[in-house]
Image (spheres, rainbow, N blue to C red):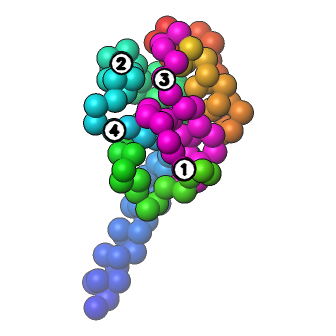
Amino acid sequence: MRHLRQLAAAAAAACLALPAWAAELVMVEQAGCEWCARWDEEIAPVYPKTAEGKFAPLRRVDLRALPEDLQVARRVMFTPTFLIVEDGQEQARLEGYPGEDFFWPLLADLLTAHTGFVEDTHTQGGS
């Protein structure tokens, strides 16, 4: 029994040592969404390499099967919808994909206004 308690304590300590994401970008999508496909072509390959992507990792969810751990401010009606989420709570959203030229500045503005993100204008998404 003592060995099990020690093992549980070690596991708990290891979990505390793991980095916790303060924010995430949740992409609400659905099959057949042409704007989701366009985002996949233009943004998805570079997103994880950007300051925005490192600060708010991408999580993809289906419009018709939103996870229970996601608390949205209001019903999601359009795809793609991008939610800025902290601790499971929606902080802000971008409805639709406005194209690559507009996506990066809008995302940076939302992250800056609603999270601890500090925009680095020298490495802004895709630049």
Circles 3 and 1: CB atoms closer than 8 Å: no
Circles 4 and 2: CB atoms closer than 8 Å: no
Q: Which residue is mark 1?
A: 75
Q: Residues within 10 Å of mark 3 (few under 14, many from 20)?
A: some
Q: Which residue is mark 3?
A: 97
Q: For the residue labelled by badge 2, is the local secondary structure a helix, a strand or a loop?
A: helix
4 or 3: tag closer to the N-terminus? 4
Instruction: Work out whether residue 3 or residue 57 is closer to the camera in this orientation and state it.
Output: 57
**Quarter of the picture holding the N terminus:** bottom left
Q: Which residue is mark 4?
A: 30
Residue 25 visible in the snapshot: no
Instruction: Classify residue 55 as left or right of residue 113.
Output: left
Circles 2 and 1: CB atoms closer than 8 Å: no
Circles 4 and 3: CB atoms closer than 8 Å: no
Look at label 1 and name its amino acid: Arg
The residue depicted at 35 percent of the width and 83 percent of the height is 5
Q: For the residue labelled by badge 3, is the local secondary structure a helix, a strand or a loop?
A: loop
Look at label 2 and name its amino acid: Arg
Magenta segment includes 76: yes
Q: Which residue is mark 2?
A: 38
Residue 34 visible in the snapshot: yes
Marks 1 and 4 sit apart, C-alpha to C-alpha, by 15 Å
**Residue 114 occupies quadrant:** top right
Circles 3 and 2: CB atoms closer than 8 Å: yes
Q: Which residues are magenta?
A: 75-101
Rendered position, 20 above or below 121 = below
Magenta segment includes 26: no
Please provide percent x and percent y for residue 33. Answer: 34, 29
